[in-house]
Image: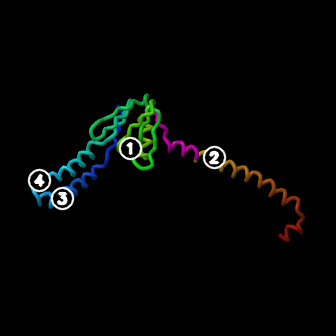
Amino acid sequence: MKKLVFRIPATALLAACLIAICVTPVAWAVPGLQALYVLPLGYAYWVVRNRTTATEEQLVARGLFSSTTVRWSELKSIRLVQKGWLKAVRSDDTEVTLPAVRMIHLPALSVISGGLVPDPNASLEAEKAAARDAEEAETAEKAESDEPAAESDKTETPESVQSEK
């Protein structure tokens, strides 16, 4: 069974380490402020927990405290968000945020879903191929129409006119 997992990059855990280092002087200055270490631990848990798993049958979106499953048959569309993660729209118009899935991942989702999610790159490539074919046909047509005109100029023009050119 095919399976894709979209995660927040593990390098984000470096930020949790940096936060822990920065909190240390403040946390040990006054008794009880050691509770500030909950911040980097919570952030690290968020980075590790948030993910989207896509299989041939379903999408599983894991959030901080819950997980939501969307079967491909329940999927109405994928909503593109200006900034942030994509959202899966179910047939009842409820939206499920897909953690760590961005617009660049749509071709991979198209492959794993068996074409249920359209691949935007495929449509762009088809448009470019159609434009390229139309341009080649236009160039070939122009070349064919130019050849007879050039031949007729040579045969119909008197020598005196040709020498003046």
Q: Residue type at mark 2?
A: Asp
Q: Position of residue 109 (x, y in %)?
A: 42, 39
Q: Which mark is residue 133?
A: 2
The nearer-to-camera label among 3 and 4 is 4
Q: Residue type at mark 1?
A: Val
The nearer-to-camera label among 3 and 2 is 3
Q: Nearer the viewer, residue 65 or 103?
A: 65
Q: Residues within 10 Å of mark 2 (few under 14, many from 20)?
A: few
Mark nearer the N terminus (4 vs 2): 4
For label 4, the SS is loop
Mark nearer the N terminus (1 vs 4): 4
Q: Quadrant of the N terminus?
A: top left
Mark nearer the N terminus (1 vs 2): 1
Q: Residues within 10 Å of mark 4 (few under 14, many from 20)?
A: few
Residue 86 included in the magenta stretch of the image: no
Q: Residues within 10 Å of mark 1 (few under 14, many from 20)?
A: many
Label total for image: 4
Inter-mark Cα distance, 3 to 4: 17 Å
Q: Which residue of the protein is positioned furthest toward the left in this rendering?
A: 31
Inter-mark Cα distance, 4 to 2: 72 Å
Inter-mark Cα distance, 3 to 1: 30 Å
Q: Position of residue 104 (x, y in %)?
A: 43, 47
Residue 116 included in the magenta stretch of the image: yes
Magenta segment boundaries in residue numbering? 113-127
Inter-mark Cα distance, 3 to 2: 60 Å
Q: Are marks 3 and 4 in contact (CB under 8 Å)?
A: no
Read off the residue under disc 1: 101
The nearer-to-camera label among 1 and 2 is 1
Q: Is residue 22 above or below residue 71?
A: below
Read off the residue under disc 4: 32
Q: Are marks 1 and 4 in contact (CB under 8 Å)?
A: no
